[in-house]
Amino acid sequence: MHDLICYCFGYSAFDIERDVLAHGKSTLMDKIMTEKKAGSCQCAARNPKGR
């Protein structure tokens, strides 16, 4: 199992590395921000550290 970086959307360090290799940069932050603006972020509930 890969360490999760984003508990809300299930992104791991491996996902970010793969994204950078595919796009030359990580596009995942844009996806996360779009979802946060839509109210889909639940970091406090899903992240065991409450962030």
Image (spheres, rainbow, N blue to C red):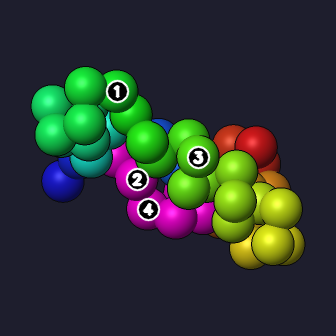
Q: Closer to the N terminus: mark 2 or mark 1?
A: 2
Which of the labelled discs sits on residue 10, or is there none? 4
Residue 46 drawn at (x, y percent): 65, 64
Q: Closer to the N terminus: mark 4 or mark 3?
A: 4
Q: Within the image, what quadrant is residue 38 found in?
A: bottom right
Label 3 – label 2 distance at C-alpha = 13 Å
Q: Closer to the N terminus: mark 3 or mark 2?
A: 2
> Does the segment drawn in magenta span residue 5?
no
Contact (CB < 8 A) between labels 2 and 1? no
Which of the labelled discs sits on residue 25, or is there none? 1
**Residue underneath mark 2:** 11
What SS does tag 1 mark? loop
Residue 2 drawn at (x, y percent): 23, 47
Contact (CB < 8 A) between labels 4 and 3? no
Across the whole image, how many numbered discs are drawn on residues? 4
| Front of the two marks 2 and 1 | 1
**Residue underneath mark 3:** 30
Residue 9 to residue 26: above or below: below
Mark 4 neighbour density, 10 Å: few (under 14) some (14–19) many (20 or more): few
What SS does tag 3 mark? helix
| Front of the two marks 3 and 2 | 3
The structure residue drawn at horizontal position 56% and vertical position 41%, both measured from the top left corner, is 29
The structure residue drawn at horizontal position 52% and vertical position 64%, both measured from the top left corner, is 9
Q: Closer to the N terminus: mark 1 or mark 4?
A: 4
The structure residue drawn at horizontal position 77% and vertical position 60%, both measured from the top left corner, is 36
Looking at the rendered structure, the kind of residue marked 4 is Gly
